Amino acid sequence: EAQVTQNPRYLITVTGKKLTVTCSQNMNHEYMSWYRQDPGLGLRQIYYSMNVEVTDKGDVPEGYKVSRKEKRNFPLILESPSPNQTSLYFCASRSLGLYQPQHFGDGTRLSIL
Amino acid sequence: AQTVTQSQPEMSVQEAETVTLSCTYDTSESDYYLFWYKQPPSRQMILVIRQEAYKQQNATENRFSVNFQKAAKSFSLKISDSQLGDAAMYFCAYRSAEYKLSFGAGTTVTVRA
């Protein structure tokens, strides 16, 4: 089954404790991206990647890191999480071609205390 | 960053009736792509419908259709014969040649039985 898999789905942690949210897709998509969803703001892009070893900042990259060492994986890293990073996070992927829709993971609810 | 505006935070519709969700966007580009995504309480992001800006014909997917007015930069979604399963948050999204997908703040649709 074609899918984007995020882990964990829920995480409660404390300020300053490094964490990684994993994202994996099995559709051989070149393009992958991370979003955060906050009430009243919709989804905002954090980082995206056009292919292996190619990443770029989205609209809200501060406090986040990503890597793309393999085509299928695109982890999101919070080196020193802070409470303002409490949010719902989505990973998405798609093939190149502007009309291609994004396939989303099921989301990760992060709470930073 | 591109701006996508959904001016209706909430909409309510009677089962079997029709509801229209508004979306406007700001762009100076002539070639772009527009999407509507549905997010039910399960928080999955589901593609509802998509439209290419260079196509004048409005897209239709079963009970879902759009009214695309390029000059007015408007992209409304009409849900006909509303069903209880249509209850969700709906997001309008815009993508340009830069590949970045920008979302509106969302409209919550409630369906009354």
Image: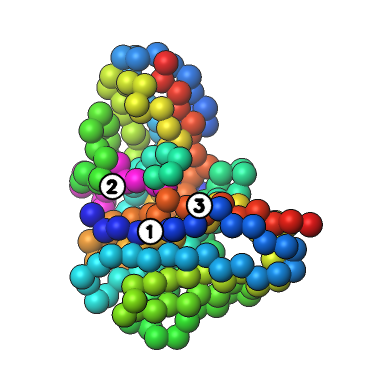
* Residue occupying image coordinates x 50% and y 52%: B9
| Towards the viewer: B83 or B62 | B83
The answer to the question of whether label 3 and label 2 lie on touching residues, with beta carbons closer than 8 A, is no
Q: Position of residue A64 (x, y in %)?
A: 27, 31
Residue marked by disc 2: A48
Q: CA distance from mark 2 to mark 1?
A: 23 Å
Badge 2 amino acid: Tyr
Of residues A109 and A32, the one drawn nearer to the viewer in this rendering: A109
Looking at the image, residue B111 sits to the left or right of residue A70; the answer is right
The structure's colour scheme is rainbow
For the C terminus of chain A, the image quarter is: top left
Percent x, y of residue B25: 33, 65
Residue at the image position 41 percent from the left and 27 percent from the top: A86
Q: Residues within 10 Å of mark 3 (few under 14, many from 20)?
A: some
Q: Which residues are magenta?
A: A42-54
- Residue identified by numbered label 3: B9
Verify whether residue B105 appears in magenta.
no
